[in-house]
Amino acid sequence: MKTVIFGNNSFKTHKRGVENVILTQIELYNNSQIYYFHWGSNNSIYKYKNIICISIKNSINLPIVLNIILYKLKNIKFIHSHNPLFTFFSFWRTSIFTLHDGLYYLAKSKKNKKAPVFYFLELILYTRIDKIHFISLFAKKESLFWGKKKYAIIYNSSHLENITPVPETIISNTDYYLIVKGIEERSRIDLVIEVAKIHQNEHFIIVGRGPLFNFYKELIISNGLNNVKMLGYVEDDILITLYNNAKCVINIAEYGEGFGLPIIEAYLFNKPVLASNNCAIPEIIYNKQYLFENSKESISNKINEYAFNVNEYKIDYNSYYLNMFSKKIIQERTKQFIEC
């Protein structure tokens, strides 16, 4: 029995986000051999734990290479895809497709000139699958899905549930706002910097990597801001300690936030979250009074409101996480959908 998973990145290089959602789902297929396909700099095969990983180079030969490998595998029982292009080019139908953000929605949000191409590609994509899993109501709403197939809306969980924090961290201060994001345009780190200028007595720690990391780091230095630190990527045990020590988590999203993993991770560690009134965030936030608009004034006002009423924010967020997003609950819902 062979189960094929289509993903985007190597488990070795991408430790968070979609890859950990996939690793959680893979546990549901423990009675079969798992083959994980992802993008890579070259065509190669290697092992990650008990998973056979197949890296495919993004080139004009992708459809040929993909289908030759699938043909050689034979006896494929199930294909669970998170990669729309692999699903699109595969001669084999995808059993379940997990949609994080619609192709056309993302292209349109980025003002990509090829957005019309993605429109038709996404429509064709849905003809290549049997069932579809949306990670939020927002993801479904922004997709081009027409509702003629079985679908389910199942939230994400956090892989941090079973990881032990380190006793010490590289940050000794425990009075800071924590931001955990990919450092790219849609994460609006520019707003964090503007807010830090207003609240120079507050400290902001930014965790994550991405194409704009050096740009924002230089911007922080040029503005002489000693209250903002960009740590880049940190290992999970250190991230957990950072969550544990933070007084509050801030999550800003301009677009492309089909769920909001740092929000539920904050709840796992019993921390309040102040976040954008945007994308899927209002759907999963503990209370809509914690939302702000994407402007420095609105974020600043929400920080002031939090600081002034800090005792009102001392709520059992962990129970909210366990009831809504725990690994046990999400895996059970996913298993039911796989088997239906």
Image (spheres, rainbow, N blue to C red):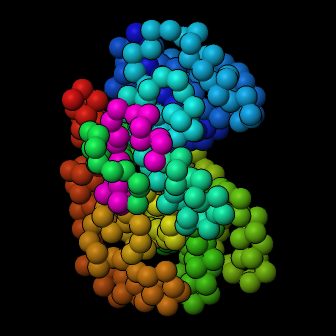
Residue 179, visible in the rendered structure:
no
191 relative to 338 in the view: left or right: right
Relative image position of residue 283 (x, y in whole percent): 30, 64
Of 282 and 171, nearer the camera is 282
Residue 116, visible in the rendered structure:
yes
Image quadrant assignment for residue 188? bottom right
Q: Residue at x 25, y 79 (%)?
A: 312
Image quadrant assignment for residue 40? top right
Image quadrant assignment for residue 11? top right
Of 25 and 317, nearer the camera is 25
Image: magenta residue range: 123-141
Relative image position of residue 338 (x, y in whole percent): 28, 29
Q: Is residue 93 above or below residue 182?
A: above
Q: Does the magenta segment cover residue 297?
A: no
Q: Does the magenta segment cover residue 138?
A: yes
Relative image position of residue 146 (x, y in whole percent): 33, 51
Q: Is residue 139 above or below residue 49?
A: below
Q: Quadrant of the N terminus?
A: top left
Q: Is residue 3 above or below residue 220?
A: above
Q: Residue at x 48, y 22 (%)?
A: 92
Q: Is residue 134 above or below residue 217?
A: above
327 relative to 65 in the view: left or right: left
The mark total stands at 0
